Image (cartoon, helix red, strand yellow):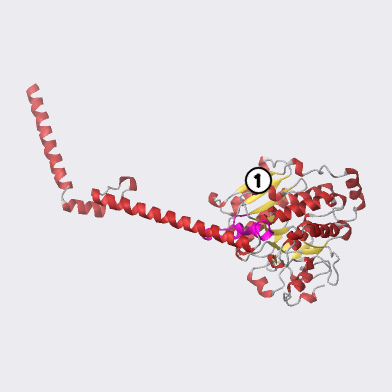
Amino acid sequence: MHVLLSKKIARFLLISFVFVLALMVTINHPKTKQMSEQYVTPYLPKSLQPIAKISAEEQRRIQSEQEEAELKQSLEGEAIRNATMNAIKEKIKSYGGNETTLGFMVPSYINHRGSPPKACFVSLITERDSMTQILQSIDEVQVKFNKNFAYPWVFISQGELDGMKQEMIRQAITDSMNGDPELINIKFAEIPADEWVYPEWIDENKAAESLISLANVPDGDSRAVRYQARYFAGFFWRHPVLDEFDWYWRVDPGIKLYCDIDHDLFRWMQDEGKVFGFTLSMSEAKEANEKIWDVTKKFAKDFPKFISENNFKSFITKKDSEDFNNCEFTSNFEIGNLNFYRSPAYRKFFNYIDEEGGIFYWKWSDSIIHTIGLSMLLPKDKIHFFENIGFHYDKYNNCPLNDDIWNQYNCNCDQGNDFTFRSGSCGGHYFDIMKKDKPEGWDRLP
């Protein structure tokens, strides 16, 4: 029995040896290799792909080529960086150094290898804003513009925004981007408590009196509106959440966009060297701006180096005099370079204005402070009116009067409601100063 079993085992081992030997011969046969490479290898996952055998000399050649390519790429990158730094230095020098407003902003206009602008939407959420308004403004911007460009959103709130509201905001933006997580970038931040109060030098009794005396002015009796004005005029651009950005587009809850925007406005501002863009301008109530022009003239006298030679003072003064005309760029729509506000000139200007207390003793708004700062510290060609953007806030509308623009951008607004050339607007004044041709029919509006 044992002898018979041993013979069977020996026979099995012999047959197995012969089979393996035959298989090895077959596998290594040129014809078999050719068929395998043709019909099997292409369909294997990369992890199972056969590794080609190469000689030591070939390995050294490949390694040498890789090292040479890496060195070339490194040198090219260094050359580009050096060229960029040299270009920045020369540009800053041409503006008179980085203490000047334009000199300070130069790095944000250097487009590294065609990279997009470092830009975001900024939406300030206060206790007065409803979720309906917030979600409406998000939808307007996403549908009309950002679905094509996927710029980040930054929400800065008065107090912490609760989880449910944050989730509603995330969902609204996610839905507009078809749920693609790579296209969604949302940041939430809070207003620091010490930036939403009376500063220590303010006489609170005097501030309280202004709430009564200006009750006939829109929001003249609101302390919260004054806090918001001070925050937007002098603090939002300092928030750490915005440190990584050069550009912002202010989106207020409740705004509407009337036209499709198929081109990158941030890129356009960057490439054209603009600093600030607006859609609405108007004349603010005189009593709200009491003494602000006197303070501005004193600032210009004390710090003449900050005043641009080719400034836009003519926009904020009357045609036949140096008197203030109360014109302002309405702040509910702003596209601007954050580095303007970060510049030494604007910081000095804001602090000068802030210490006068006019935000609380009268009603100096962020719109008027921005407008005066922009008009005095920049050349006028750095400020741009977006006549091709349909925009609505409160009771004011910007609707393109040019029929070609209105049709091209699928605008859904009534041109008869455009505010640009109406009484109370400073749009016509802007066109006159900039020597721009007014659109056909501008003078037929009521």
Residue 110 visible at all: no
Horizontal and vertical percent position of residue 165: 68, 44
89 in the magenta segment: no
Judged from the image, the secondary structure of the residue bearing numbered disc 1 is helix
Horizontal and vertical percent position of residue 31: 17, 53
Quadrant location, the C terminus = bottom right
Q: Quadrant of residue 336?
A: bottom right
Residue 432 visible at all: yes
Horizontal and vertical percent position of residue 289: 85, 57
- Residue extent of the magenta highlight: 97-119
Query: Which residue is outermost to the bottom?
Result: 440
The one of 269 and 137 positioned closer to us in this rendering: 269
Quadrant location, the N terminus = top left
101 in the magenta segment: yes
Q: Quadrant of residue 305?
A: bottom right
The one of 216 and 65 positioned closer to us in this rendering: 65
Query: Which residue is the site of mark 1?
Result: 240
Q: Amino acid at mark 1?
A: Pro
- Residue lying at 84% horizontally and 56% vertically, measured from the top left: 295
Within-10-Å neighbours for mark 1: few <14, some 14–19, many 20+: few
Q: Quadrant of residue 413?
A: bottom right
Compared across the picture, whether 232 is left or right of 408 comes to: right
The one of 367 and 185 positioned closer to us in this rendering: 367
Query: Which residue is outermost to the top?
Result: 2
- Residue lying at 68% horizontally and 46% vertically, measured from the top left: 239
- Residue lying at 76% horizontally and 72% vertically, measured from the top left: 433
Number of marks in the rendered image? 1
The one of 261 and 428 positioned closer to us in this rendering: 428
Compared across the picture, whether 395 is left or right of 14 comes to: right
Horizontal and vertical percent position of residue 293: 84, 60
